Image: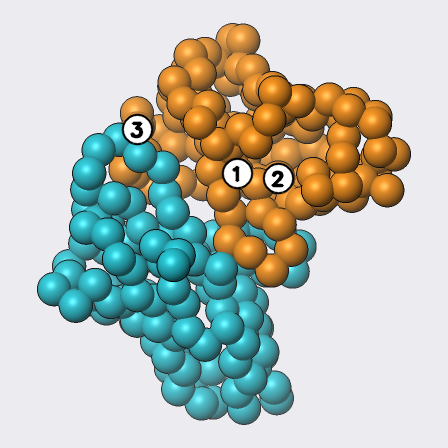
Chain colours: A cyan, B orange
Amino acid sequence: KNEVEQSPQNLTAQEGEFITINCSYSVGISALHWLQQHPGGGIVSLFMLSSGKKKHGRLIATINIQEKHSSLHITASHPRDSAVYICAVLSNSGNTPLVFGKGTRLSVIA
Amino acid sequence: GAGVSQSPRYKVAKRGQDVALRCDPISGHVSLFWYQQALGQGPEFLTYFQNEAQLDKSGLPSDRFFAERPEGSVSTLKIQRTQQEDSAVYLCASSPRQGFGYGYTFGSGTRLTVV
């Protein structure tokens, strides 16, 4: 079983819809990252969080440490939000690299 | 520079050919990471540099893979005798602080196709 599982794998939404992408992990963590990857390959860091909730524009990220679960929400989705969204966790067991999920491919249709 | 720069953006190599992929991190960033991302997968860790020291190379898949950062800035990932399974996007990231636990800036990646 992967340490980081994302759902759904693929998501198609109509412009304006509220979108939720989920991330579950199996290890104790010190931080969780949400990242956005566009078709050209480059990755942009959206959030790094270890508790609670963070908001940036139309993006909201939440984390529940006890349940080992995080969600990324996009409000009022737009075609330019189309990308792959990746969850990555940093284990609290020592100086170890980020472990990435496989990503959720989002397509927002006008 | 303003961001992490990787070159080339795309590389097609014949099986058995050697390739070199370059990463130019943000100036002054201490940490530099290489990741390999196969099609449809998340990035997987290859190696980590703190300045010029390669502190972790546990993710390098075979001895055909070699990375260096001789002056603590630009890094090169070299793959010898490329195989088809080496086809992937190779991502570089840098961070202003030591260790794995801080914000990263990623480059746009090099897409390697081995034919």
Name which quarter of the figure residue A56 lies in: bottom left
B22, B114: nearer the viewer: B114
Query: At which x and y percent is residue B92?
Result: 54, 35
Q: Residue at x 49, y 43 (%)?
A: B44
Is A73 on the left-hand or right-hand side of B35? Answer: left
User: In the image, what residue type sits under mark 3?
Assistant: Gly
Q: Which mark is residue A86?
A: none
Crowding near pointer 2: few (<14 within 10 Å), some, many (20+)? many
Q: Which residue is mark 1?
A: B35
Q: Which residue is mark 3?
A: B99
State whether discs 2 and 3 lie on one chain. Answer: yes
Crowding near pointer 1: few (<14 within 10 Å), some, many (20+)? many
The residue at the far top in this view is B71
User: In the image, what residue type sits under mark 2?
Assistant: Tyr
Circle 3 marks a residue in which chain? Answer: B
Is B61 on the left-hand or right-hand side of A26? Answer: right
Query: At which x and y percent is residue A41?
Result: 62, 52
B62, A98: nearer the viewer: B62
Say if B25 sits above or below A58 in the image: above
**First along the sequence among labels 2 and 1:** 1
Say if B90 sits above or below A55 in the image: above
Q: Residue at x 41, y 82 (%)?
A: A19
Element under disc 2: strand
**First along the sequence among labels 3 and 1:** 1
Q: Which residue is mark 2?
A: B90
Element under disc 3: loop
Circle 2 marks a residue in which chain? Answer: B
Say if B63 sits above or below B111 in the image: above
